[in-house]
Image: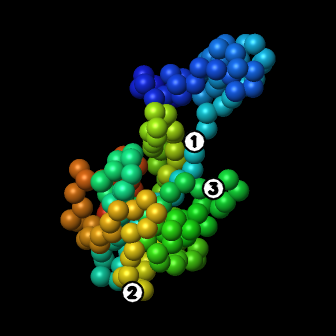
Amino acid sequence: MRNNIASHPANVFKFCPRCGSNAFIFDSEKRFNCSTCGFVYYLNAATAVAVIIRLSDGRIVLTQRRFDPAAGKYDLPGGFVDMGERVEVAAVREVAEEIGITLNTDQLEFLASFPNTYEYKGVCYFTCDVAFVAHYNGTENFEANDDVQHVITVLPEAIDYDTISFDSIRNILKLYCEKYAG
């Protein structure tokens, strides 16, 4: 995806990571080539997870982001999938890390996936955000941990989409509302 934003890797990465040459050229939608040593580097989407935690009364859990990108905006519990990790395991891990509750992979129902851009420290990362729904009947002792500043619960129809962090999260929440809430 050739993009005109300053943080697109084509505008940031200037030298070959193998030989150091400045002949490291972004020549297509997703590939860099070094004409000096022949090294080829592909841009691929990073996988991330997001979990809609549905409480027994229909409210869902939102987290407020502590750090950029989108510090102060609302998000869903989730994060990046580690290399070699299944997305379901990443979803359970991220929920535990961010809000302190334990889910198991059997509680996760796949909702959808959406592309997203995630700008971090001057570089745009392209992600594929995989969304799950988890029904949770436990106690609501949610803790704001890791990169979460605050945890709230909200009825889906009360979501203010202007306060949501990323396009992918807005799309996930809107799809959830179409399918489940209402």
Report which residue position mark 3 lands on: 82
Residue 102's tag is: none
Residue occupying the point 36% across, 56% down: 65
Q: Give the structural element (helix, strand or loop) at label 1.
A: loop
- Marks 1 and 2, the one that precedes in the sequence: 1
- The image quarter containing residue 152 is bottom left
Q: Looking at the image, can residue 27 be seen?
A: yes
- Marks 3 and 2, the one that precedes in the sequence: 3
Choose mark 1 or mark 3, whichever is in front.
Answer: 3
Q: Amino acid at mark 3?
A: Asp
Residue occupying the point 39% across, 74% down: 143
Q: Amino acid at mark 1?
A: Ala
Q: Residues within 10 Å of mark 3 (few under 14, many from 20)?
A: few
Residue occupying the point 39% across, 47% down: 68
Q: Looking at the image, can residue 166 be seen?
A: no
Report which residue position mark 1 lands on: 45
Residue 100 place in picture, x, y as percent: 46, 75
Q: Amino acid at mark 2?
A: Thr
Q: Give the structural element (helix, strand or loop) at label 2.
A: loop
Q: Is residue 16 left or right of residue 52?
A: right
Q: CA distance from mark 3 to mark 2?
A: 28 Å
Residue 87 place in picture, x, y as percent: 60, 61
- Numbered circles on residues, count: 3
Q: Residues within 10 Å of mark 2 (few under 14, many from 20)?
A: few
Report which residue position mark 2 lands on: 139
- Tell me if label 1 and label 3 are in contact, CB under 8 Å: no
Q: Residue furthest right?
A: 37
Q: CA distance from mark 1 to mark 3?
A: 13 Å
Viewer-proximal residue among 38 and 72: 72
